[in-house]
Image (cartoon, rainbow, N blue to C red):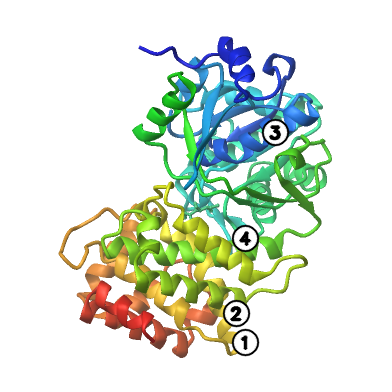
Amino acid sequence: MSAALAPGHLPELSRRGIGPGYDPQNHAAGILHIGCGAFFRAHLAACTNAALARGGGNWRIVAANLRSRGDIDALNAQGGLYTLLERSKEGAAVKVIASISHAIAATDHRDRLLQALADPAIRIVSLTVTEKAYGIDRGALDIDPAHASVAADLAHPEEPAGVLGYLVQGLALRRKAGHAPPTILCCDNLPQNGKLLRAGVLGFARRVDPDLADYIARSVAFPSTMVDRITPASTDQTRRDALQLTGLQDEAAVETEPFFQWVIEDNFPTGRPQWEAGGAVFVSDVEPYEDMKLRMLNGAHSMLAYGGFLSGHKYVRDVMADPALSRLVARHLRAAAATLKPLDGIDLGDYAAQLIARFSNPAIAHETYQIAMDGTQKIAQRLASPAAHALQAGQDIRPFAFAVALWMRYCTGATDDGAPYDLRDPQSGRIAAIAAASQGNPKALVSGLMKIGGAFPAALSQSPDFQSAVLDCLKGLLDHGVAAAIRKEAAL
Ligand code: CS2
């Protein structure tokens, strides 16, 4: 039996050049992160590790999960340490990260999470909780009162369980104690994520205590940010490789790609770590970077996830080895790039080529089924928004229509062989009802799914051109089968 990763191993790991680069005991926590999944550990926590190594400071992270226990126990048993593997075709680079001080499972310890939110030493509260967890009505820029945790937390604001409930109660506790509030940093793949989260927090606070809402509006910063690092879910192979490379057992090991990007709006009145050390870039306006990433990387990802999954490809790298699908990925990237404003210092052709190389990374096993999850939460920013732009500008809408049709085909819940799968979408009940009511009629399916709340703006759902382009693509997928329709589309 090999030893389990523990703080006692740090001197030896440092001697081998795979340690964190600082003594974690010398740094107190200054960040509370909500959403302690693989992406956070491959991105914000890894970047904070680099910032601690270069710039120091009391910026370690208390990491919390709201719903699942996930790796909370494993991290605590290891003193917050975990192994990060960066996989490329040349092999895996390994490093032990020490930026997490400890982890909290809020389902068991609401009090501990509230204490951390109220603690004046915590100057940044960051989040990666996925798009669906917020409960924000993106169109109205307000809360979605029908969202389960928003509704529950509004009924019992002092005993929160959801994101907005916790943030607002934490801010109320700070204010009551006379402490300065933290900066709140949303790191999910949502457009203008800081602005959106601010709107959600204010909408929630206004319903609980209008004075509190005014205080938040006056005194809390919500910088927007674009985050990027392809991070598949950890598997037994991740843990086996971590053990092989470090000699230590790590139940919380994470694997990712070498690429890292983080563009952040420089608005941190409460201070911040020297994240530049880990590759973060600070700008005054993040929106063009968000649009680039959401429309190109994430839009192409969603298209290839639906098309790939339905064609029997388990991993993104397999999709990229399929000549027809990889042609469609390149087509999608070109169409998405055409909808973007030029960005200083960025060549979108180079960015597209880099994305193709990243998607093709043979060492990364990123499941198409993982990316296909939560389509109703992703379509608006990834596919509908560039489609609306293309439509208005008289550009080619076909690539977006095809991607949307692939999502709709996916929504029927079974492959061409009749094998059923779970949609894994917060609106799966509604989708299933629409699919059942359409009785295999593609026109009914298109018009039903276009009405899913928030996914399609009126500019698209009321556009006969867009509707008929999607319908044409969906008919092809249903009549000829997914693989044949993809081949035909790629030959266009
Ligand atoms: C993916 C993203 O699961 C998904 O929907 O498109 O998680 C993607 O891997 C990241 O945004 C890359 O930064």
Marks 2 and 1: CB-CB under 8 Å?
Answer: yes
Q: Nearer the viewer, mark 4 or mark 3?
A: 3
Residue at screen point 22% across, 64% down: 415
Q: CA distance from mark 1 to mark 4?
A: 21 Å
Residue 97 point in image, percent of width and height: 60, 27
Residue at screen point 46% across, 61% down: 301
Q: Is 407 drawn above or below residue 150 in the view shown?
A: below
Q: Identify which residue, 185 or 8, lies in the foreground.
A: 8
Marks 4 and 3: CB-CB under 8 Å?
Answer: no
Q: Nearer the viewer, mark 1 or mark 3?
A: 3
- SS label for mark 3: helix
Marks 4 and 2: CB-CB under 8 Å?
Answer: no
**Mark 4 vs 3, N-terminal side:** 3
Q: Name the residue carrying label 4.
A: 191
Q: Amino acid at mark 2?
A: His
* Badge number at residue 393: 1
> What is the quadrant of the C terminus in the image?
bottom left
**Mark 4 vs 2, N-terminal side:** 4
Q: Amino acid at mark 1?
A: Ala
Q: Amino acid at mark 3?
A: Ala
Q: Amino acid at mark 4?
A: Pro
Q: CA distance from mark 3 to mark 2?
A: 38 Å
